[in-house]
Amino acid sequence: MSNLVTCRNQIIPTVARSVAVAAALCCAGIASAQSSVTVYGIVDAAVVYTTNQTATGDSKTSIDAGQLATSRWGFKGTEDLGGGLKANFMLESTLANDTGAGGSSFGGGFKQAGDTASFFDREATVGLSGGFGSVNAGRQNMLGVNSIGLADPMGLAHAGTNPNVVYSALNSGALFGGYGTNGGGTELRQNNSIKYVTPIMSGFIGAAMYGFGEKAGDNSANSYAALSGVFTDGKSGIALAYAKLKEANGSNMNLVGGGAKYVMNAFTFKGTYAQSEVDGASSVAVFRNRKIAVAGLGIDYKLSAATTLTGAYYNTKQSGSVLGDGKADQYIVLGKYALSKRTIAYGSLTYAKAGSATNPADLQMSSGLVVGGNDDATRVAFGVLHSF
């Protein structure tokens, strides 16, 4: 969309021609100022069958959006300011293409009564970039998402139940909603934030981010501060991230995480580890001294130019909470077939096992797959993803 106006030779009256020329010159000025604007997105839907979704063991069949990758749409653009300096913007919204809903609440679920709705919930930033790197301000991903995402065993597939997204990226409102800049809900993305990313220096990329709590008289309340570093040769790589999120009363939640990916011929080996820990000053009793840790291992095998097979395992543990200790495991097999550069057909099999059928701490660690009264669940999904 770099050319905003397309001109064609037409025979028109003299007066109309003059008006058309003036309009074209005006629009040409706009086009030259706006170097490029891109409309893009992902539309992903799958048929999903899941066992043990009630206390009596009933199964469920559904059409779910965003199983291989979260469905989304957005705009992004850049303007060349000269001298290597560019202005950039990005506006991105979640798309629930199974129902047609767009945008989500800060809580991560689609708009519900009482939620604070955010139309461009995934990204809403403006900034500058150049030889110094980039600086962006607005609502944007916390640094841990980018770092853990480098080596997530499933490539962030099944984001709604992926332990690295739910726990390592703090995407569970029930467990992390009191911390950071959102004033409730999940913390995967931070409002009122500014992020600096360095240029690539011999394969190294560093980043720093701060989210303002915007509370009069207490600048640190509900704030977010983080650092991350990534080293990559373009295929393999390693990433680390650290973040401190504050509650309204000043209580801290510390997050540390990392991942590594190694490519060897047709195989890619991936591993991640992350943990969040809340201090004893939390205003919510169930949060105090709670630690959640997630370990993940995965392997991709490139069967052909179009076909990739993935095996993944996650172990999730909770300790220190007044609920007691809890644990759960996930085992996933995922197959992807590229029908074209933009369209992928896929299928997956997931088995989730909680530590018990009744311990709330165990059930919390199952990423929502295991329902009370059961200690396991099996999910089968077949879908199609198209990007534009």
Image (cartoon, grey):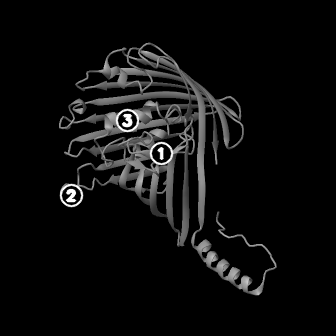
Toward the top, the furthest residue is 56
Instruction: Name the residue: 55% across, 42% down.
Output: 100
Give the residue type that dot 2 points to: Ala
Is residue 227 left or right of 322 when viewed as pictured? Answer: right
Secondary structure under tag 1 reads strand
Q: Are marks 1 and 3 in contact (CB under 8 Å)?
A: no
What percent of the width, then of the height, locates residue 20? Answer: 70, 80
Q: Are marks 1 and 2 in contact (CB under 8 Å)?
A: no
Residue 335 appears in which quarter of the rendering? top right
Q: Residues within 10 Å of mark 3 (few under 14, many from 20)?
A: many
Give the residue type that dot 3 points to: Ser
Secondary structure under tag 3 reads loop
Q: CA distance from mark 1 to mark 3?
A: 29 Å
Q: Nearer the viewer, residue 362 or 279?
A: 362
Q: Which mark is residue 231?
A: 1
Please indicate, yes or no, whether residue 335 appears anywhere in the rendered image: no
Q: Is residue 195 above or below residue 290?
A: below
Q: Which mark is residue 68?
A: none
Residue beneath label 2, please? 216
Residue beneath label 3, please? 172
Secondary structure under tag 2 reads loop
Mark before the other along the chain sequence, 1 or 2:
2
What percent of the width, then of the height, locates residue 231? Answer: 47, 45
